[in-house]
Image (tube, rainbow, N blue to C red):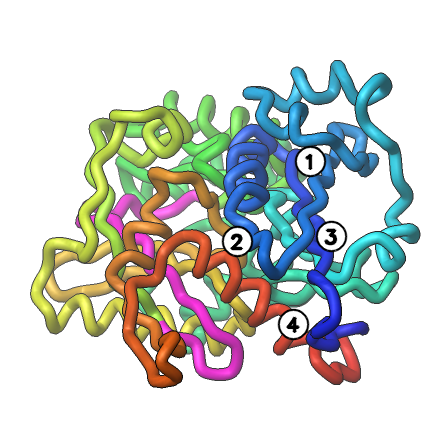
């Protein structure tokens, strides 16, 4: 893969967003913001929209600023330019992946970019696939000694053959309330918190709409946190953010509708627990092979830290907790006088650093990351 520093010209950055997942609208919001955060003194930006069929389009800025993916799709034939994935190596030097959920965080787009030899931001095929699959990463985390909620994984065929048996297992092994979620979905899509058997059956059926496998988890009531990790070989954890919301869980609406949740950085626990969260976040990033940036979600109950999910991508919008955490970071830059100065990590700097980390991670690689 080409990873030279491009000292004689600006680096061509293709920001890819939209997509086929249930998270395409927040992907649009993320891609729009990242596109406008590109440092134009160093980068030349190209907006790449993936439609609901998985086709790729180069679009002008006047489409980037539209509110919904359907609005963009309605204008693609007239104002967009359809492109083939195999044409990307001649068009861009690096892809900033702003796709979220299925086909964006699960290794799919990463595999395509590996095949055509284009540098991309974030983690590789394997790390992305494992972190997207809740059953798989929970098994790895539990086997590695991390505290995770108890769960039962149920496939669709297994469910159809023995609903009463599974309901009985949940009552005995997990209890109520419990959490039902699709194994491979994000942004709380398909998630429910049933408090009795009748609600359990409905929740499982709904979760199967989104994925052929469902996870039924122990309900953990504590302080919910998100901890951003960044770096390649030696990742660092930012100060974790606590989210406060109403209801049984952090829903899609509370995540993305203004005013539905409040965020506190750092999480309101003792300094020792904050350090424990950060330490575990780094350990998990190394274990899972998270590269560039990602985040670890979980819960604090007393002094215990439960790990919910590792993620290889995250939403990036102006109000995002990612930038709350970044604002608590100090980075070292060269001063105009030739010395060094420590400054706060602002959104544009974070996007630039993510691009730089991608170039570093792909430098001289001999295989998939």
* Residue ranking furthest to the left: 270
Residue that mark 3 sits on = 108
Give the crowd class for mark 3: few <14, some 14-19, many >=20 residues within 10 Å. some
The residue where tag 2 is placed is 313
Check disc 1 and report its element: helix, strand or loop.
loop
Point out the stretch of residues depicted in magenta: 216-236
Magenta segment includes 230: yes
Callout 2 crowding tier (Cα within 10 Å): few <14, some 14–19, many ≥20: many
Residue at 22% across, 49% down? 242
Q: Residue at x 46, y 50 (%)?
A: 152
56 shown above or below 72: below
Q: Main secondary structure of the magenta part?
A: strand
Q: Is residue 116 left or right of residue 357?
A: right
Report how far apart the C-alphas of labels 1 and 2 lie in the structure: 14 Å
The N terminus - image quarter? bottom right
Which residue: 18% across, 47% down? 264
Q: From this view, report whether residue 318 is shown above or below residue 284.
A: above
Distance CA(mark 3)–CA(mark 4) = 20 Å
Q: Earlier in the sequence, mark 1 or mark 3?
A: 1
Q: Residues within 10 Å of mark 1 (few under 14, many from 20)?
A: many
Residue 122 image-quadrant placement: bottom right
Tell which tag, 4 or 2, sits nearer the viewer: 4
Work out how far the residue at label 4 is from the one at label 2, CA to CA, in angstroms: 17 Å
Q: CA distance from mark 4 to mark 1?
A: 24 Å
Label 4: which residue? Answer: 359
Question: Quick one: label 1 or label 2, which is nearer the N terminus?
Answer: 1
Q: Position of residue 137 (x, y in %)?
A: 51, 62
Instruction: Check disc 1 and report the residue beneath it.
Output: 19
Q: Mark 3 or mark 4, which is nearer to you?
A: 4
């Amino acid at each position: 893969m080409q990873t030279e520093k491009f000292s004689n010209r600006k680096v061509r950055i293709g920001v890819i967003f939209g997509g086929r997942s249930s998270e395409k609208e927040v992907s649009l919001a993320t891609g729009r913001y990242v596109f406008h955060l590109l440092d134009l003194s160093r980068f030349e930006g190209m907006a790449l929209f993936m439609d609901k069929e998985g086709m790729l389009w180069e679009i002008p800025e006047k489409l980037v600023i539209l509110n919904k993916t359907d609005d963009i799709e309605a204008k693609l034939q007239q104002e967009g330019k359809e492109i083939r994935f195999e044409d990307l190596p001649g068009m861009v030097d690096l892809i900033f992946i702003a796709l979220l959920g299925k086909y964006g965080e699960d290794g799919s787009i990463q595999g395509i970019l590996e095949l055509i030899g284009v540098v991309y931001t974030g983690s590789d095929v394997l790390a992305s696939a494992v972190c997207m699959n809740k059953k798989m990463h929970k098994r790895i985390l539990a086997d590695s000694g991390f505290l995770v909620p108890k769960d039962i994984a149920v496939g669709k065929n297994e469910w159809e053959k023995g609903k009463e048996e599974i309901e009985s297992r949940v009552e005995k092994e997990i209890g109520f309330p419990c959490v039902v979620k699709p194994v491979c979905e994000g942004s709380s899509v398909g998630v429910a918190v049933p408090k009795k058997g009748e609600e359990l059956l409905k929740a499982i059926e709904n979760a199967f709409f989104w994925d052929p496998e469902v996870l039924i988890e122990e309900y953990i009531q504590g302080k919910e946190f998100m901890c951003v990790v960044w770096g390649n070989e030696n990742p660092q954890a930012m100060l974790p953010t606590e989210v406060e919301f109403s209801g049984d869980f952090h829903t899609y609406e509370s995540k993305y509708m203004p005013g539905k949740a409040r965020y506190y950085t750092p999480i309101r626990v003792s300094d020792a627990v904050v350090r424990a969260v950060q330490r575990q976040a780094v350990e998990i990033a190394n274990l899972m092979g998270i590269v560039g940036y990602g985040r670890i979600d979980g819960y604090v109950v007393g002094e215990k830290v439960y790990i919910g999910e590792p993620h290889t991508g995250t939403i990036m919008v102006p109000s995002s907790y990612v930038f709350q955490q970044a604002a608590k970071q100090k980075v070292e830059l060269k001063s105009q006088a030739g010395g060094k100065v420590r400054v706060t990590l602002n959104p544009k700097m974070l996007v630039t650093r993510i691009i730089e980390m991608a170039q570093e991670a792909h430098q001289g690689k001999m295989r998939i990351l």
